[in-house]
Image (spheres, helix red, strand yellow):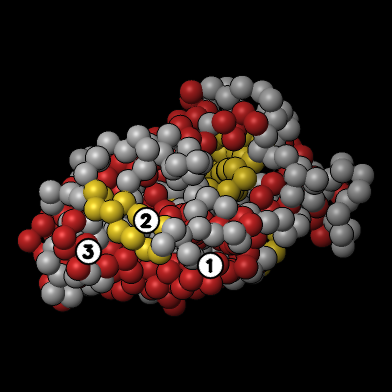
Amino acid sequence: MSIFQKFLEWLSSLFGSGPAPTTPPPIDNTPTVPKITRLQPFRTTPVVSSAVFSKVLSDAKSPMLEEAGNIRDAVRGNPLPLAQSFRESQYGKDASAQRNHNPLGLLWYAGCPITTYESIIVSPTVTIRLLKFPTWAAAFAEWQRRMDDPNYRPGAPGAYQPADLSLEKFIFTYVGGPQCFTTGVCGNGETPASCRSYLNDTVDRINRYYTLTAPSVPTDPDDKPLVFGKVPLPKFNDKRIKDQKNRAWDLLGARLVRGVVLHRMLGSKNGTYTYFTTVPGGNAANCPAGVDTTYINGGCNGLTDWGIDASSGDCDMWNSPTGYPTTGVSANRAPWASGPYAGVPGDGKDYVDKFGVNSINRDLPSVEISGQYNDPISEACKQKVVDIVSYHADQAKVPWSSFPMNPATGETFLFYHWEFCGKATKICPGPVVEAFLPDLIARVKVVLNEWQTGKRT
């Protein structure tokens, strides 16, 4: 469908000529090139293929080239340690790296399972023990073990374990020690400035690796091409609230889904629908300019995209998350869902710093679950949330291997309401929904994997 045809369809919907489609047209599978930032959780760095590992090492005339495939397998396709091996040893060409097959500068520590090392005198008072490995790939395997081991990090067990540990904090910890990022007191002769240089070089290098895959589509860890747009839209009740019954939205341009915000209704699904459709005299034109401080006329104060019953999993669409209109419903309504913006530090602020305040309600569909903050949510409800998030993530072309990170934004795909409004305003979505997050992420990855790799059709 051409842009002109879409415009005519939208224009006709304003004058009651009938409903427009509720789902977007088939997705464009035009390849995208991932891009990361210093804020990317290091565990979710989008993977690259064995071919990329080989090309990088071949172009660098690295002695590690013959083991490129094994190195890639040892780190499950993560390009981060590959980039680090440039910074640490120019891809293994440093003399000490070649003597020990240790391109990452991995040191011995008390309790280390690798017990063979070379002692190197750095100064009259400092001697380091550089580990020896039988192969290059074995060194990368030890790097991966340290990332996976919750007890690893001498003096600070678990320093690499937080699931959301950013590349920035990881590099500072890896290079300068556990206190380097938080206090600026770095070990190993490093400084915050040297760590920052290491970080910037590593991020830039990884992003150059991703351009080597273009124009190929992103691949999964088995190098299989990914196909997007296959995850089905889950069953829902089309109850989009007409403009006459709700004025809690803005026209901020086309809605571009960059993530999802999780909410709790603090009421029932049907009650919330009634609240959102209550306006003075039955007409949203009568809404006051600001918030209705009586909190009777909810149609003047708020609107969300999806409403899910916490028990049955029954789902309503109250506003189109992708902006599609219908009779009496304007196109591209950005609902007053995830504000007010408070600028609290964290994922929400990082997102707004990149895309602006308007992008919160415009580009992040709101998924709202009935009940109070501490009320349980059923398996049927959880499954519906998984289905909706999976659909939106797939439409946004988020590879299963990088989820919950969105390579197109360099930010997470999942947000809590309080990450934008601040907990001083609301703790939404509350502890029950937040406790579901790890399971939600794991289940969405499974769904995306099945559809994007062709296991399901």
Closer-to-camera residue (325/292): 292
Q: Residue at x 67, y 34 (%)?
A: 430
Where is mark 1, residue-wise? 191
According to the picture, the residue beneath numbered tag 3 turns out to be 96
Residue 145: give x, y in percent of width and height.
30, 41
Label 1 neighbour load within 10 Å: few <14, some 14-19, many 20+: some
Give the amino acid at mark 3: Ser
Q: Secondary structure at mark 2?
A: strand
The local crowd at label 2, few if under 14, some if 14 to 19, many if 20 or more residues have their Cα within 10 Å, is few
Residue 382 position, x and y percent, is: 50, 30
Quarter of the figure that contains the N terminus? bottom left
Name the residue furthest right: 294
Q: Judge by depth and name the residue closer to the eye, 227 or 320.
A: 227
What is the three-letter code of the residue carrying label 1? Thr
Chain-order first, disc 1 or disc 2: 2
Looking at this rendering, what residue extends furthest in the left direction? 66
Name the residue at 46% across, 32% down. 439
- Residue type pointed to by label 2: Thr
Q: What distance separates the C-alpha of mark 1 from that of mark 2?
A: 19 Å
First in sequence, mark 2 or 3: give its number.
Answer: 3
Q: Please tell me how crowded label 3 is: few (under 14), some (14-19), or many (20+) other residues with Cα within 10 Å.
A: some
Callout in the foreground (1, 3): 3
Whether residue 388 sits left or right of residue 223 in the image: it is right
| 41 lies left or right of 291 | left
